[in-house]
Image (tube, rainbow, N blue to C red):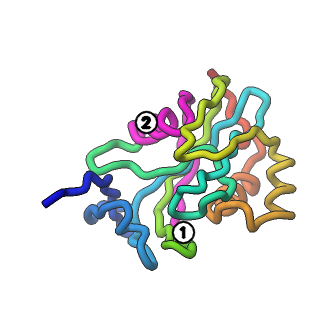
Amino acid sequence: MTVRNVDQVILVDSADREIGFAPKPDAHDGRGMLHRAFSLFVFNPAGELLVQRRADEKRLWPGYWSNSCCSHPRRGETMDSAIHRRLAEELAITAHLEFQFKFQYWAQDTRGSEHELCWVYAGCSAERPRPNRHEIAAWSYLSPRAIDIEMAYMPQIVTPWFRMEWARFTESVPGRLAPRRCG
């Protein structure tokens, strides 16, 4: 018998209390299981956001534009370790990241769903991304104004969580859009 080596996500209740674990694919089947996730917003020194187009081989929302990086902490992994691990895996960069907010959402795709309690971080990096082609098909830096225009005129090409997170960023103090510390 062969056992698959599959990452396990952390299942949580609506108060973000850990209640168990599940293989990542199972957590995204059907209507999904509520699990812990994170989203990263990485700005360059000019205040532009690094956005990415998800690889066509991604199970959920392939080919959609999204924020800089998203994923899940693994079983037994701290959130701090997870966000830096994933930023290195997907974009081969480092960034000083600061926690912004948490929110819960559910979104259905044709091949499954996202049911996540998502921790959102923002930071800055002057490093040039070197994307993992299995995760990212394309990338660009966009000004907040350009993102607003894309969201308004082509929302169908943007991941649902990016739309929700961006709305929360833009309703807050504008200074949050461009973190002060970059390196």
Q: Which residue is mark 1?
A: 105
Secondary structure beneath dot 1 equals strand
Residue drawn 73% across the image and 62% down it: 157
Residue drawn 60% across the image and 60% down it: 62
Residue drawn 67% across the image and 50% down it: 53
- Say whether residue 112 is magenta: no
Image spot of residue 85 (x, y percent): 43, 36
Q: Amino acid at mark 2?
A: Arg
- Quarter containing the C terminus: top right
Quadrant position of residue 161: bottom right
Residue 85 has which mark?
2
Q: Amino acid at mark 1?
A: Tyr
Residue range (magenta) = 80-104
Image spot of residue 50 (x, y percent): 69, 40
The Cα atoms of the two marked residues, 1 and 2, are separated by: 24 Å
Total numbered labels: 2
Say whether disc 1 or disc 2 marks the residue closer to the N-terminus.
2
Residue placed furthest toward the left: 1
Image spot of residue 16 (x, y percent): 39, 61
Report whether 33 appears left or right of 137.
left
Neighbor class of circle 1 (other Cα within 10 Å; few <14, some 14-19, many 20+) is few
Report whether 173 appears left or right of 42.
right
Res 103 visible: yes
Residue drawn 77% across the image and 34% down it: 47
Res 14 visible: no
Q: Is 101 placed above or below 18 here?
A: above
Report whether 181 appears left or right of 150.
left
Closer to us: 113 or 162: 113
